[in-house]
Image: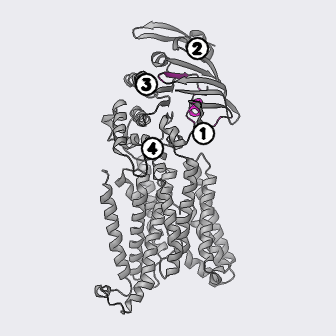
Amino acid sequence: MSLSVTDAHVRLGDKQVLGGVSATFATGQVTAIVGPNGAGKSTLLTCLAGLRKLDRGQVLLDSTDINDIPARTRAQRLAYLPQIPEVAWAIDARTLVGLGRTPFIGARGLSTADDEAVDRAINLAGVADLADRTVATLSGGERARVLLARALAGEPEWLLADEPLAGLDPGHQLDAGDLFRRMAAEQGHGVIVTLHDLHMALRMADRVLVLAGGRVLADGAPRDALSPEILAQTYGIEARTAEGAAGPMIEIISRRN
Amino acid sequence: MKNMPRPVLYGALIVALIVLSIVSLSAGQIWIPWHVWSGVSDDPRWTIILELRLPRTILGIFVGAALGVSGAALQGYTRNPLADPGVLGVSPMAAFGAVVTLYFDLATQVPWLLPTGAMIGAFAGIWILLTLSGSASSILTFILAGVILNTVASAGVALAMNLAPTPWAVNEIINWLMGALADRSVDEVRFAVPFIAVGCGILFTLSRALDALTLGESTARSLGIRIDRTRILLAIGIGLATGASVAVTGVIGFVGLVTPHLLRPLVGARPGALLIPSALAGAVLVLAADIIVRLTPSPAELKLGVAMSILGGPFFLLLLIHMRRRAA
């Protein structure tokens, strides 16, 4: 099972956001997309999710053009979690998670099987204690975890999450990282996340894609893709990889000018 | 607030609707006592029931349902509790369409031209609204588009009255604009009911899409909702339901705004779950208001549209204050 993008070009206004991105993603792996602000990470993710048409290039899900897959079928296979969440009404967290079942339900609403999937997602994301709360009363981090549960409720083959760790405390960051790892390793799902936290990328990803200025700068094993040379080139920082208690870590030393 | 179980909510609304329908058939300047109902078919009061009260009651139910569900659908789509066909300029555009036919005195010659004008106005209104607000329908552009439509429609109506050839025409326009269920006949029922039924039916199918839109447009799309299709169905449904309502009763505001708002806490705030209850409660509200208007002693019969506006203004204000308090 694979999700691949070939020669993706996207222009927004007068800015070339993606300028020829090619990459292939595999199930059973966690891929982290990193890069500076405005590198095109979110745009790439929306293209992979089939939500944005490319000016040039193609996104293939198992060798079918993603735009040729019916919206509902695509939604059953692929979940997308946007960076800036929007929750319009005073719905409770459980109802929100239930919206993740949208591609599966008919006119009659949630079935028993849907309810069970919602329960599983709530437990996986560890938000059982929040389920009855109105979403507006949740903190930013709590809301992010509930929204993650929403993305899991469809039990998708592919999870595409834009900054899923932003706003989470360190404990819950580790929980979410573990969850992604288990989804990939145990259930064989494909997980693609964009991250700003390089250390978390090193820690949880099987593979890292470094994006800068709408192009792929590096693509490979985390330690190779996040080498000091590439970090200097991408972010303009001096950094080095060191061995920490929990494996390799990135120590950021200074800003380079 | 705890959600009300669906059968309880639907049941309560349907019972209210049945009771009010019976009252609506009985109440007025001439009360129809109970014994008339039991069979004696040559009682002259049956004429009142069949030719005056029955069309009035049926129209009240359908127009109320149309306005309630149109408000619920627009609020769900725009994710804004202040949206409603009146506020966003759809009903005013329908009224403008009808006024054009009154201005040219077409309605007296060809009776079906007035409702047709209203339908055209409603479709033009909803089409302009959805086009102006664009695919990136931010709430601000939506409201702005509504304000523009409202301004254009009321300017058009004012112009028609300004230039009206005879005082009689002005009178006709004003009278029609005030909105009423009084003196409607079976013809109006025959015209409006099919359009309203189809329009409401279309809007009911949007339940899943409106629920998903709670999470914003891109998430809804990622959940397999086709936004362009939703938008077109919304436009057709609202055009038919609101257009046909305005066509036969003039502008009756407030229903589309208040009905979903009152019901929202009872259905766990799910916009899709609001559609059918809003239709039922809209019907209840219009029937109840029409009965009150009918029974209020006044020199000329109080117009339903006027009564609704009198209630609607303060309610709108309270809603705004309430929202600001919650936001603060």
Q: Residues within 10 Å of mark 1 (few under 14, many from 20)?
A: few
Q: Earlier in the sequence, mark 4 or mark 1?
A: 1
Q: Would you name the residue on which mark 4 appears? A: A102
Q: Residues within 10 Å of mark 2 (few under 14, many from 20)?
A: many
User: Do the residues at discs 3 and 4 belong to one chain?
Assistant: yes
* Front residue (pair A16, B113): B113
Residue A147 at what x, y percent from top left? 43, 36
Residue at horizontal 49 percent and vertical 81 percent from the top: B186
Quarter of the image containing the C terminus of chain B?
A: top left
Bounds of the magenta segment: A27-55
Residue at horizontal 48 percent and vertical 73 percent from the top: B306
Q: Nearer the viewer, mark 2 or mark 1?
A: 1
| B166 relative position to B53: left or right | right
Q: Nearer the viewer, mark 2 or mark 4?
A: 4
Image marks 3 and 2: residues in contact by CB distance under 8 Å: no
Q: Earlier in the sequence, mark 3 or mark 4?
A: 4
Residue at horizontal 29 percent and vertical 85 percent from the top: B34
Q: Secondary structure at mark 4?
A: helix
Q: Would you name the residue on which mark 1 appears? A: A68
Chain holding disc 2: A
Q: Would you name the residue on which mark 2 appears? A: A231
